[in-house]
Amino acid sequence: MKYLKAVIKMINKTLYISFSLLFLFAACKDASSNPQAPDSTQWILVWSDEFDYTGSPDSTKWGYDIGGNGWGNNELQYYTSELLNARVEDGIMIIEARRHEGQQPEYSSARVVSRGKEDWTYGRFEVRAKLPSGRGTWPAIWMLPTEWTYGNGGWPDNGEIDIMEHVGFDPGVVHASTHTNEYNWPNNTQKTSIINIPDAQTNFHSYILEWSPDKMEIYVDSIKYFTNENEGTGWQSWPFDKDFHFIMNIAIGGNWGGQQGIDNSIFPQKMEIDFVRVYKKK
């Protein structure tokens, strides 16, 4: 009997610890997927789109890159401005990639940009989004310069900021990167980091860039996982001292997204965007 009581006590203790750990995990998960607003003593909201309308994305805030030339990565989609590929409904902006069987081009999608509408140097940039899924998808939330004035006047001399990239053959792994003349992917020297967000394709998360003259920090919700500091060695390593603009898109295939082929059974696929917000330091 004494032995039985000891076993029961041990089982109860194990159950208590297990339920406590489950509760702690749930609390942490909830805190990370529902981040608090930025400190109002430091940041002030200067621009946003809450998507509280229906139809095409607000033309005073968004434009489009259109075409199907591979976009430097041998991508297979043709980007359009059609509602089929970019629209706002039920408080969400939807970027949708579709397959058109038996047609050329076979895939369509959208690449929505703020270029020429709103451009910024420094600040906090937050996009709350749910990502598409499936092998062959390559969604991105990123920024390019509005004026290309450094070096050869092209890429990567003038910089690129990747707030979020995800490839469908590697589900849940989110990437942040920057590219410059000195640090870029063709040379495999880009500044980059990854984080595992298992429900990135089923739940909304905030993808956040905080950018100052000294450094960039990138977060998913409240978790910081990428830092790039200004080395003070000139534009070759830090061209990030001028206006950049938002780009949000779903590419199909390409040098990275298509490394393991395309699953044609997955289409259509959507990236859903709850809001886009830009803050400046007070």
Image (cartoon, rainbow, N blue to C red):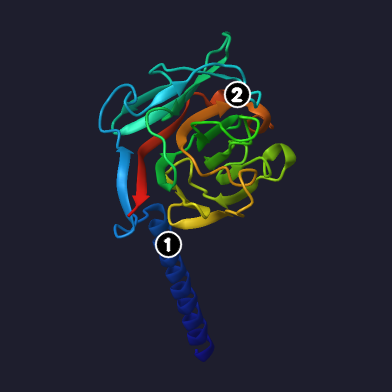
Give 36 or 13, whichever is nearer the viewer.
36
Amino acid bearing label 1? Cys
Q: Helix, strand or loop at disc 1?
A: helix
User: What is the quadrant of residue 246 in the picture?
Assistant: top left
Element under label 2? loop
Q: Is residue 271 above or below residue 218?
A: above
- The residue at 56%/8% (across/down) is 103
Report x, y in % for residue 238.
59, 46
Residue drawn at point x = 43 percent, y = 69 percent: 19
49 lies left or right of 8: left
Q: Is residue 81 above or below residue 128?
A: above
The image shows residue 154 at horizontal and vertical percentages of 62, 29
What residue occupies the far top of the structure in this picture?
103
Q: Amino acid at mark 2?
A: Trp
Q: Judge whether 203 appears above or below 135 on screen.
A: below
Q: Residue furthest bottom?
A: 2
Q: Quadrant of residue 120?
A: top left
Q: Which residue is mark 2?
A: 71
Disc 2 residue crowd, few under 14, some 14–19, many 20+, Cα 10 Å: few
The residue where tag 1 is placed is 28
Residue 112 is labelled as none
